[in-house]
Image (cartoon, rainbow, N blue to C red):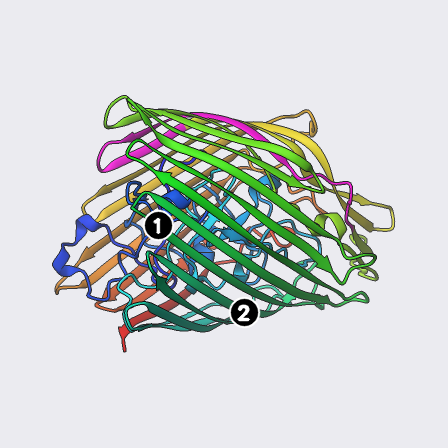
Amino acid sequence: MAPPDSVQKILPPAGDTLAVSQSQIDESQIPSNDTLFPAISIPESLVAETLSTEIAPTIFHDRIYLSKGPADEIKSIAGIFMRSPGPVGSPAIPLEYLNVSDLEIKLNGLPFPYQGLYRPYVIGTDINTIPWEILNSIEWNPRNGYIDGLDFQVGRPADNSNRSDIVIDRGGYRYDAAHWRFFRPFGNKTYAYFTVGFKKSGGYLPNSNYDAFHVTGGVSRKIGNGELSMDLWQHKAKAKQNSFDYLTSQISKQKRTVDRGEIHYKTSRDGRYFLSIAGLLQKNFQTITGYTSPRDENYSVGGVQAALSDSTSERIWSGGFEYYRFSISKIAGPHPFISQFEPSVRMRGNLSSIDYDLKTAYSWNKVDNGAILPSAKLSYNINERQKPFVELLRSRRDPDLNLLYFNDNVEGLNLSQRLHSYRFIGNQTLSMPLTSQVTAGLESDWGQVNSIIGLSLKRIGSQIYLVYSKDSLANVIVTPTNFDDRFLEFFAKARAESGPISGEVSGAYRRWSKRFFSDDLEKGPAALGFARLSYLKEYFIRRLYLGGSLEARFSSRRDYRSIDAGLTGSYAIISGRFEFRYKDLTIWLSDENILNTAYITWWPYYESPRNVWVGMMWDFFD
């Protein structure tokens, strides 16, 4: 879907699953250690917006979240519309639309390359590896401009106080999770934090247990007009995988460790010039065992990026570059690596009643060589309430070394006549998707109601498709290949609020090109829908809030074109939540898949039966 003009921050701090509309409480009701209105953090990639006070993002505080945390909440955001992929530990961003160019994620403005090892192979990113407690921002499709929902603040408290919080969750299928974090100032210039937590799940299907542990730490210090910060984290997990057949207990297991270090420096001069520099080193270690063929792999990325901006009353200029080196090891043959360099320049401002945002970049790597990536968005302010816009965009996905070089071979599956052996073969001639799109629409703001409606035409050059071939002996070979694709999408979204009641509804309808797949088996769902209705109000005594939320998701018929055809019927699920908050204590009760509808399809695209779970958060000074 096309994004609204402003960056939306719509998730509260990790574990803080309740957010309140500012119109619902006055200043005297806000807790002194307020977590209802977290500080705003804007992506590093938008350095001018990061430090300039002239651009303020839109914030929605009217949602009660149906999730165990941000990772699960992301799965049901309207603009993304991921299905829950089963128990904790499954790939958290499956290839729902078969649109690989939409699968990039940045954490705190820096790349996050984590492709889990799964059998069968899954294209996506496992966001269960992310320690949400320390994030400042997460960006979905940073190049494509999809800003709906994944850019949020879960970092340190704005008041820089001695503060701690404890979160505990418990649910069905032996799901348990907890974390503890604390923040400490040292004088007026230095601030530090530490987090430790775990998450585990028994899984509702055989052989889908999951057990994870993470520890994080960081320090920041003010230096003149700027700030220097460093963040370190480690994530460890062990997961059993219900591979190939959800009806037969399997013996596949996965171990993984993700080590990540970030360093950031931001400074400004005269309130006009802004400089941002960031560095990253991340190493992924993972092993998958079971059957007769264990596989392991090390995947790493390191690099630096910088941006400089000049902010005036009429426009903001910014320019910069990023350089990253991706490498993979513990595979057959030489250990490949790819370096990517991308300079860019951007200008934002307004001219009379027209707002403009212009950017151009040049991206180069040895896989796809060079590509010019321009983007432009023009908006015309008809009045204070309505603004039509048009957007042109060209983007390219970062290289995926797994798709190029990873190989896997599993023998002796003996799953009746369905599957005897499985082999995944990387394709070193593969190109990364290059997407071009044009979008036109209308944004409206009527006070308590705001909406966006539009039409988008997208062409995806070098789209990636997993080709499955199966012989008479049930031996399956899978390899990625390229093809060109295109679709036309109509989308609409609206949010409304009246007193303690708020709601939102969104939907999209895609017309796929039949040039490459003419058998009417869609590459993804043609229609998607999402709706949420929330209620939140102070009752009886000051700072006692009671609320609830009901949400529904819908997807039309689809086919995943995997080893076995996926569910071809439509998909619908309803979930609910009740929440109690008194001062610094929050308790919630959630009911997922209330109607207990069974939507189980090929791994990992399955939906759990009805699941009721509870959780609590205590946020306190110490």
At 14% from the left and 54% from the top, the residue drawn is 26
Report the residue marked by disc 1: 268
Q: Earlier in the sequence, mark 1 or mark 2?
A: 2
Q: Is residue 316 magenta?
A: no
Taking depth in this image into account, of 447 and 406 the one nearest to the observer is 406
Furthest residue toward bottom: 622
Question: Which quadrant is home to the C terminus?
Answer: bottom left
Q: Could you tell me the amino acid type at mark 2?
A: Gln
Q: Mainly helix, strand or loop, the magenta region?
A: strand
Dot 2 falls on a residue whose secondary structure is: strand
Magenta residues?
425-453
Left or right: 434 in relation to 170: right
- Give how far across and how far down residue 105 sits, in percent: 53, 49
Residue holding disc 2: 234
- What amino acid type is highlighted by mark number 1? Ser
Q: Position of residue 617 (x, y in %)?
A: 33, 69
Q: Marks 1 and 2: CB-CB under 8 Å?
A: no
Mark 2 burial class by Cα count in 10 Å: few <14, some 14-19, many 20+: many
The residue at the point 39 percent across, 65 percent down is 220
Residue 391: assigned label = none
x and y, in percent, of residue 334 in the image: 81, 56
In the image, residue 166 sits, relative to residue 374, either above or below, namely: below
Res. 522 in view: no
